[in-house]
Image (cartoon, rainbow, N blue to C red):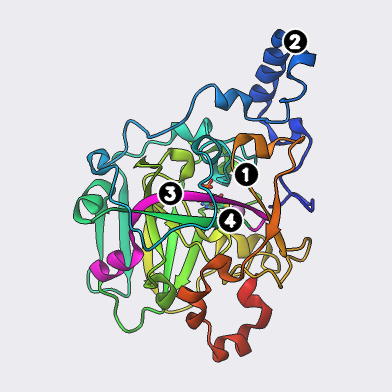
Amino acid sequence: MRIKRSRPWDLPDHAVTDPDVFWNRRRLMQAAGATAVAGTAGAWPVTASAKKIGAPADAPAAGKYPAPRNEAYTLDRPISGEELVSTYNNYYEFGSSKTIWKKAQDLPIRPWTVTIDGAVENEQQIDAADLLARMDLEERRYRHRCVEAWAIAVPWTGFPLRKLVEMAKPLSGAKYVRLETFHDPGVAAGQDSPWYPWPYVEALTIEEATNELALIGTGAYGHPLPKQNGSPLRLVVPWKYGFKSIKGIVRVSFVEAMPKTFWSKVNGREYGFWANVNPEVDHPRWSQATEEFLQSTDDVGFLASPEKVPTKLFNGYAEQVAHLYGEDLKRKYGDRLYR
Ligand SMILES: Nc1nc2c(c(=O)[nH]1)N[C@H]1C(S)=C(S)[C@@H](COP(=O)(O)O)O[C@H]1N2
Ligand SMILES: [Mo]
């Protein structure tokens, strides 16, 4: 998102690809004969496509997958391919390119301690495995809309964030739920970058957090979540721009004041607290009226031209969430509710 382009991911091949992946692919292409692959060279995670990156061996509660599907959450578009969703990612802890899937495999996820603290009756530390053992998992098919104007559709597995809130028993002072990602520059080299205010932090109001849609994602495509998608625990809030859906959660705090979030510290004018999807409120540097729906790895190469379709208000979830943003909030925040 720090890349100043109208389509931030649409960069020259070498600029978005890790040097080792880039040079490996160059060699592969040369070996295959450059003319023969010219037509498909645009599908840049070529190296990734050789090996589908699925469930980590150290994922907790592997026996709980696949979980039963909750039919209340169905899609109006096809599911994006698993290979695309597991090789085209934003996870700045591992670097600012889309091709961090390989680097993310270095993240140890067992044990994984989650701290629940702040204005709650039940402050506690709990391992992700124990947390998952207490929760009923379900599959929900959700749209995902990145602020960069690309979209995917994913069958997540997880449990409602509301269940975790109930477990914590918030006190009356708890107005916001603040979520924090691990901080370990030793395994996540992106966290060596002084340009970012690590660790990654996101937050919701308590009303948003207890809304039926807010999910803690623990799996996708019927198995535990790949590390690059935020294993073992991530947030999934499909009515908001993707950066709200924080990955690799280690701390959930219940607080009184609106937390400062990672991207609002980087650039508060462009990436605010609310970040609700709205086609009529443009990003300061590009339109949000349409999105590119990505279905397979063929859609993300520099020769690709994925279908542009209209963006939906609240990403299609107005029925479930519009009531959260009443006249008082609209008056107070205006367009900031959608940015
Ligand atoms: N900790 C952390 N969480 C994060 C991010 C990140 O860089 N770090 N990127 C966000 C953005 S911008 C998007 S679009 C989604 C991408 O999720 P996916 O890679 O599983 O599709 O993760 C979000 N969660
Ligand atoms: Mo994003």
- Residue placed at 66% from the left, 67% from the top? 268
Is 14 on the left or on the right of 160, as rendered?
right
* Stretch in magenta: 147-168
The three-letter code of the residue at mark 1 reads Ser
- In depth, the one of 192 and 78 nearer the eye is 78
The percent position of residue 308, horizontal first and vertical second, equals: 72, 53
In this rendering, does residue 186 appear at all?
A: no
Disc 4, SS: loop
Q: Are marks 2 and 1 in contact (CB under 8 Å)?
A: no
Magenta span contains residue 81: no
Going from N to C along the chain, the mark reached first, 4 or 3, is 3
Instruction: Provide the residue designation for mark 3.
Output: 155
> x%, y% of residue 330?
60, 86
Q: CA distance from mark 4 to mark 3?
A: 31 Å
Q: Pointer 1: what residue?
A: 193
Q: Which mark is residue 197?
A: 4
Residue drawn at (77%, 40%) of the image: 11
Give me the disc on residue 33. 2
Q: Is 82 situated left or right of 280 in this image?
A: left
Which percent across, then down, holds residue 334? 66, 83
Label 2 vs 1, first from the N-terminus: 2
Where does residue 240 sit, x and y in percent of width and height? 55, 65
Left or right placement of residue 273 versus residue 30 in this view: left
Q: Nearer the viewer, mark 4 or mark 3?
A: 3
Instruction: State whether residue 322 is above or below residue 213.
Output: below
Residue drawn at 80 percent across, 15 percent down? 35
Disc 4 and disc 2: Cα gap in Å?
Answer: 44 Å
Residue 191's image quarter?
A: top right
Q: Secondary structure at mark 2?
A: loop
Dot 3 crowding, Cα within 10 Å, few <14, some 14–19, many 20+: many
Label 3 and label 1: CA atoms lie apart by 32 Å
